[in-house]
């Protein structure tokens, strides 16, 4: 912790923590594969395929790995400061959370179309058909159990864990060294890199800029969790059986209709504008 009492991290420390999260997640998935193989008599490859083929396996690995890394990073940056304060987990009014949720949901389709456009301009960035099928299989809801495990994994765990690491830990801890804009940009870039897939990483970086600005404006990471959760919820609320929108499932070359992009982008802008006005009165 620096002299003015604010915790800080270097970029190298932030990258190291993110790499540690990846290593821990991988180790947990391989441990789960070994355990499943021992119980069911499977080889390691098949055990790993089954563990990663269900949403709860990767989600629990992310929850534990990111949780441990965030705790260690908070102790490194902030010493004995209570975690809630270190990670800016400050309560916000319900309407602020709801506006952030709506903005996140509305931004999904515009950012999907951005990903498609980038893939068109740079074919190497495109998600292949096999990856699209894997995502569709991982997020399908076809049983009571998956009606719980898929939303829990995709919305609650992904949004909560990632926002806690990137906007809860990294953003405020990078801010003393790099200033507000620098910290928002750096935390967004790290957030993009965390997603590995090049096209997804670029779009995640754009989303990270919005999430960073939201955290700075509200002085809390909690609206970011609402935004992120709303963003992740859209494919579950609009499954292929209900809405024919191939771009939503990552079908290569499929675009989001222009009018739909314009409408949802306008809704996102309106929600964020209202949120800015609301938080400006605090």
Image (cartoon, helix red, strand yellow):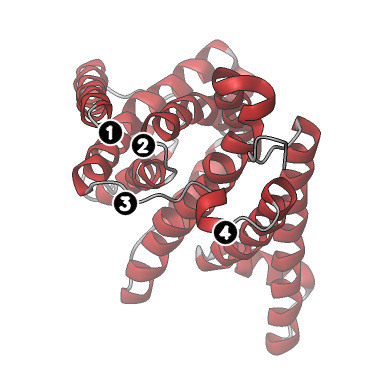
Pinpoint residue 75: horizontal percent, then vertical percent.
70, 55
Pinpoint residue 219: horizontal percent, then vertical percent.
42, 37
- Identify the mark at residue 236; answer none if there is no mark: 3
Q: Are marks 3 and 4 in contact (CB under 8 Å)?
A: no
Q: If you read the primary sequence from the N terminus, does the residue marked by circle 3 or circle 2 appear first?
A: 3
Q: Are marks 3 and 2 in contact (CB under 8 Å)?
A: no
Give the distance between the C-alpha atoms of the residues marked 2 and 4, in whole angstroms: 40 Å
Q: Are marks 1 and 4 in contact (CB under 8 Å)?
A: no
Q: Nearer the viewer, residue 126 or 213?
A: 213
Residue occupying image coordinates x 32% and y 51%: 236
Q: Which residue is mark 2?
A: 248
Give the distance between the C-alpha atoms of the residues marked 3 and 2, in whole angstroms: 10 Å
Label 3 packing within 10 angstroms: few (<14), some (14-19), many (20+): some
Label 4 packing within 10 angstroms: few (<14), some (14-19), many (20+): few
Q: Which residue is mark 1?
A: 103
- For the residues carrying marks 3 and 4, which lies nearer the camera in this image? 4
Label 1 SS: helix
- For the residues carrying marks 2 and 4, which lies nearer the camera in this image? 4
Pinpoint residue 272: horizontal percent, then vertical percent.
27, 26
Residue 134 is at least partly visible in this image: no
Q: Nearer the viewer, residue 89 or 66?
A: 89
Residue occupying image coordinates x 32% and y 44%: 230
Label 3 SS: helix
Label 2 SS: helix
For residue 251, side relative to residue 181 (left or right): left
Q: Which residue is mark 4?
A: 82
């Amino acid at each position: 912790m620096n002299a003015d009492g604010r915790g800080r991290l270097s970029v190298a420390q932030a990258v190291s923590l993110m790499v540690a999260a990846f290593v821990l997640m991988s180790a947990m998935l391989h441990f789960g594969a070994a355990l499943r193989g021992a119980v069911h008599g499977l080889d390691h490859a098949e055990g790993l395929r089954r563990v990663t083929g269900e949403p709860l396996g990767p989600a629990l690995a992310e929850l534990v790995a990111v949780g441990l890394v965030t705790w260690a990073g908070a102790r490194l940056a902030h010493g004995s400061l209570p975690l809630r304060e270190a990670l800016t987990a400050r309560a916000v009014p319900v309407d602020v959370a709801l506006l952030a949720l709506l903005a996140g949901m509305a931004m999904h389709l515009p950012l999907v179309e951005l990903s498609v456009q980038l893939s068109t301009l740079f074919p190497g960035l495109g998600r292949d058909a096999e990856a699209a099928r894997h995502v569709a299989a991982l997020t399908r809801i076809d049983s009571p159990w998956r009606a719980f495990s898929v939303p829990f994994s995709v919305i609650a765990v992904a949004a909560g864990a990632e926002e806690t690491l990137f906007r809860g830990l990294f953003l405020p801890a990078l801010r003393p060294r790099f200033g507000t804009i620098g910290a928002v940009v750096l935390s967004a870039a790290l957030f993009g890199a965390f997603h590995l897939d090049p096209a997804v990483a670029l779009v995640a970086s754009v989303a990270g800029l919005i999430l960073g600005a939201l955290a700075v404006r509200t002085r809390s990471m909690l609206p970011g969790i609402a935004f992120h959760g709303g963003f992740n919820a859209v494919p579950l609320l609009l499954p292929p059986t209900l809405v024919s929108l191939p771009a939503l499932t990552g079908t290569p070359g499929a675009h989001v209709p222009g009018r739909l992009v314009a409408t949802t982008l306008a809704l996102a802008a309106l929600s964020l504008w209202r949120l800015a006005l609301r938080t400006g009165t605090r």
